[in-house]
Amino acid sequence: MITVMATSGRADLFPRGAVDGQRGGNAASLRATAHALARVESAAAVVLVEGISDQIALEAAAAGRGRDLAADRVVIVPMGGAHAIGRFLTRLAPLGDRVRLGGLCDLLEEEIFRRGLATARVGSPRTRADLERLGFHVCVKDLEDELIRALGVPGVEAVLDARGDLRSFRSFQSQPAWGGRDPEAQLHRFLRSSSRRHQRYIRLLVEAAVDRDVLPRPLDGLLAAV
């Protein structure tokens, strides 16, 4: 695990415009990132994730495991996109070597994270095992896929049913564009069909995975590291 030191009095450490992966990103992402960055100087651990849904997942997993991330001084920073990793690592570098650093990304962004770590000179990971030793974990192919595989199609459908959304999913399955597709692919698209639904069910599926002791390895490993 890489570490960085927490300091104080560095209001200019994250200037305006550095708090989102894409300039002019959506307001919710900007607010979440800015709120997290306001707390990094007093953190014991900083976790860099691609977006708000990853933050929600980690917070739900921690709560399900009985952990209070705020009390543990673990700060999760949604970067607004994987391509921001290098900039965030570089800007965290002046904090030193007291704060543990970790991260979570999707499979397609693994190489981006690897290059970002190398460019910021916080490691030279060549393999996924190297990334994990540095505190960075990769979802295959993404967080939704990890949760669908962990719970299985019936398990995910049970969560939808409990929230009154199974009928909507059945209607979605009957659409010409999605009829005949694998149920895993159908669930993946349905869960991501709106940001509100996406964020809601990320939390609910993580809670179900914790209850059934099938939390996906990337989430489990990252929580153990911080």
Image (cartoon, helix red, strand yellow):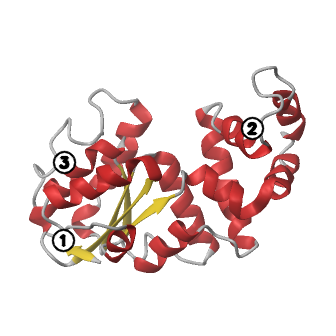
Q: Which mark is residue 87?
A: 3
Please state which amino acid type lies under the numbered disc 1. Answer: Ala
Q: Which mark is residue 6?
A: 1
Residue 8 visible in image = no
The residue labelled by disc 2 is 186
Up/down of 169 relative to 5, above or below: above
Cβ–Cβ under 8 Å for marks 3 and 1 = no
Cβ–Cβ under 8 Å for marks 2 and 3 = no
Q: Estimate the spatial distance between the alpha carbons at disc 3 and disc 1, rounded to whole Å.
A: 18 Å
Q: Estimate the spatial distance between the alpha carbons at disc 2 and disc 1, rounded to whole Å.
A: 44 Å
For numbered disc 2, what is the local secondary structure? helix
- Say whether disc 3 or disc 1 marks the residue closer to the N-terminus: 1
Cβ–Cβ under 8 Å for marks 2 and 1 = no
Q: Position of residue 128 (x, y in %)?
A: 38, 67
For the C terminus, give its image quadrant.
bottom left
Please state which amino acid type lies under the numbered disc 3. Answer: Arg
Please state which amino acid type lies under the numbered disc 2. Answer: Gln
Quadrant in the rendering for residue 74: bottom left
For numbered disc 3, what is the local secondary structure? helix
Q: Position of residue 2 (x, y in %)?
A: 24, 74
State the residue in front, 208 or 150.
Answer: 150
For the N terminus, give its image quadrant.
bottom left
User: Which label sits in the foreground, 2 or 1?
Assistant: 2
Q: Position of residue 81 (x, y in %)?
A: 36, 41
Up/down of 81 relative to 152, above or below: above
- Say whether disc 2 or disc 1 marks the residue closer to the N-terminus: 1
